[in-house]
Image: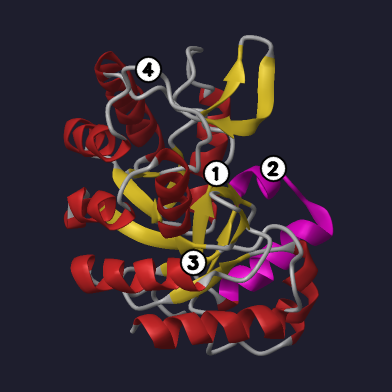
Amino acid sequence: MREITSKGAGIGLRGEHITALLQQPRRQDIDFLELAPDNWMNIGGVKQEQLADISKKYPLIAHGLSLSIGDSCPLNEEYINDVRRFLDEYHIDIYSDHLCFSRDRQGYLYDLLPVPGFTDVLPYLAARIDQVQNMTGRQLVLENISTYHRYAGEMPEAEFWGELLNLSGCGMLLDINNVFVNACNHGFDAFEYIRSIPSSSIIYYHIAGHLEYEEFRLDTHGMPVLEDVLVLAKQTVQFHGARPLLLERDNNVPALETLCAELTQIREYLL
């Protein structure tokens, strides 16, 4: 089994590619696969057998969808315990989710909503992060999400992240495309944001495509990575150094060969 190195590159595990990944020998252009534990936990039958076979070929990273670290409800301990068992079963060291909330007292909202970036939110988040890390036995890695609204009086996003990383000890999944989208939509300098993040806190990178509507940017994960984002990614790697890189494609998912060809081009451009 190959290890996930700082120069490793991977893709998300999508249903469209499972048959090909199972039938082909281990690909040399995929160093790891990222999957949502929410879609694979507590399963049996064929799907469990497929994941067991894939995990023998490729190291896995877990990228959760339902932690909802920023909501006002008690943490879902049953869910977190299920995640812990899943991580242990498949020997997954890196567990990430989103700095967001996706739940209220009535249930899950099935969207990733931004946490208001106010100073008094930071101790609350840090305490919840500590609880998750204790329960999973791993550092929690959180992703910066794309946002389309800012509340009056919020801290600058990068400053909020810096305070949170220092206070909580969590890691950051730096989504370079999301920084670019937010910079365009909210009017800040994308590279200055990235420069301000402590290098030691960055665990891995995401990169993806988005749509442009005049001055507005919409994060879609449904198209190839745009040149401006690639340029920002190269600046990021030059400044912070290489990290495992995940090419995201959640919509309009192409054939495995097409996606791997894009991954190879990105890897060669950045490294």
Per the model, the C-alpha gap separating discs 3 and 1 is: 14 Å
Do the residues under discs 2 and 4 have CB atoms within 8 angstroms? no
Tag in front: 1 or 4 = 4
Q: Which one is earlier in the sequence, the residue at label 2 or at label 1?
A: 2
- Tell me if residue 15 comes above or below residue 183 in the rendering: below
- Secondary element type, mark 1: loop
Would you name the residue on which mark 3 appears?
246
Say whether residue 230 is left or right of residue 154.
right
Would you name the residue on which mark 1 appears?
64
Do the residues under discs 1 and 4 have CB atoms within 8 angstroms? no
* Image position, residue 251 (x, y; %): 73, 58
Q: Range of the magenta residues?
A: 36-56
Tag in front: 2 or 1 = 1
Q: Which one is earlier in the sequence, the residue at label 4 or at label 3?
A: 4
Tag in front: 3 or 1 = 3
Tag shown at residue 42? 2
Tag shown at residue 137? none
Mark 2, Cα crowd under 10 Å, few <14 / some 14-19 / many 20+, is few
Q: Look at 66% across and 66% down and name the residue there.
A: 223
Would you name the residue on which mark 4 appears?
152
Q: Amino acid at mark 2?
A: Asn
Mark 1, Cα crowd under 10 Å, few <14 / some 14-19 / many 20+, is some
Tag in front: 2 or 3 = 3
